[in-house]
Image (cartoon, rainbow, N blue to C red):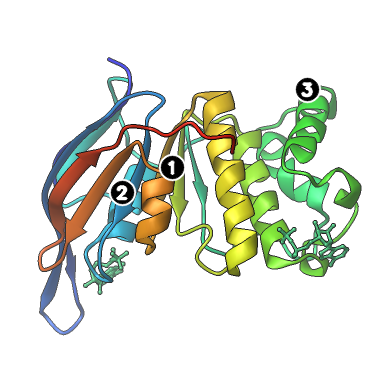
Amino acid sequence: MSGLTIENVSMRFDLPNGTSVQALKDVSLDIKEGELMSVLGPSGCGKTTLLNILAGFLAPTEGRITLNGHPVKGPDAERGMVFQQGALFEWMNVRDNVSFGPRMAGKRERDWGANVDHLLDVVGLRDFKEKAVYELSGGMQQRVALARCLANDPDVILMDEPLGALDALTREKMQGLVLRLWKETGKTIILITHSVEEALLLGERLLVMAPRPGRIHEEYRLPFADEGV
Ligand code: ADP
Ligand code: ADP
């Protein structure tokens, strides 16, 4: 079975003071391969918790996650994460950041080199390869983050408010880039956002979550407008 399946997932955080927080309650969801889904909902409704569970960073207290029929047990290269900000190696240059995954996987430059250069072209950073990340603008850093994620060739891209910290104009450009990448690569993309507008633009499927406890409140499928982005 292909795609990502979430079955009856609940997450409870036990706090040191003996109380606990029910961050997610009985969440079930099937995400088909190649779907673009955005997740919207108020602060505290469990969006980040859900994404961290999908990434394998957190184990749910109940329920299970499968990717293409196989249980998700921990983080691996099949699911790539793009964070809001700050997850790059700021002192390293752009190319080393983007090639980090393949290098850690023990691949040789002749195997990843051309692809990394291609990705830097795709995200428009060809001329910035040698720059250290801290020298770049916020928008450029998020493009590095996107390219770094793509360099691992994940089946599923998980984005935790990747555009939340950007100014309006930069955000608009990045939204166009995400949409273009989705269309070109056919990858499954799940994107958390606080912006209704962004959710409508970047979701053929839109999930609205509600808090206390975090759960799926409503789901929409949107006819996808294909206007020259
Ligand atoms: P969102 O991303 O929608 O803002 P989160 O997933 O961050 O929501 O949080 C959902 C709930 O779980 C919140 O009440 C939050 O305080 C709680 N929570 C999240 N992570 C932890 C943690 N590591 N320990 C304790 N409580 C947590
Ligand atoms: P974005 O964040 O979408 O790249 P910006 O408005 O931040 O947009 O930057 C616009 C352009 O200015 C960039 O595409 C780049 O060509 C140039 N630029 C921005 N920051 C830097 C920098 N620190 N060093 C060199 N050029 C930069």
Alpha carbon distance from label 2 to label 1 = 9 Å
Taking the image as four quarters, which one is ligand 1 found in? bottom left
Image coords of residue 90 (percent x, y)? 74, 65
Of residue 184 and residue 59, the one placed in the foreground of this image is: 184
Mark nearer the N terminus (1 vs 3)? 1
Q: On the image, numbered disc 1 is attached to which residue?
A: 75
Residue 156 at least partly seen? yes
Residue 111: image tag: 3
| Mark 1 Cα shell of 10 Å, populated few (<14), some (14-19), many (≥20) | some
Q: Residue at x 31, y 48 (%)?
A: 53
Q: Please, what is the three-letter code of the amino acid marked with disc 1?
A: Pro
Residue highlighted by disc 2:
53
Image quadrant where one finds the C terminus: top right
Looking at marks 2 and 1 on the same chain, the residue that comes earlier in the sequence is marked by: 2
Return the disc, 3 or 2, that comes first in the chain's sequence: 2
Indicate the amino acid at tag 2: Ile
Q: Farthest residue in the bottom direction?
A: 17
Circles 3, 2 touching at the beta carbon (< 8 Å): no
Residue at image coords 15%, 50%:
216
Assign a secondary structure to mark 3.
Answer: helix
Circle 3: residue type: Asp
Q: What is the x, y in percent for residue 133?
A: 78, 62
Q: In which image quadrant can residue 177 be found? A: top right
Q: Residue at x 78, y 68 (%)?
A: 134
Marks 3 and 2, how far apart at CA: 31 Å
State how far apart marks 1 and 3 are (Cα). Answer: 23 Å
**Drawn side of residue 129 relative to residue 227, left or right:** right
Q: Is mark 3 within 8 Å of ligand 2?
A: no
Most extreme residue toward the top is 1
Give how far across and how far down residue 87 sits, in percent.
Answer: 60, 61
The picture places residue 109, in percent across and down from the top left corner, at: 83, 29
Note whether 11 is above or below 5 in the view shown: below
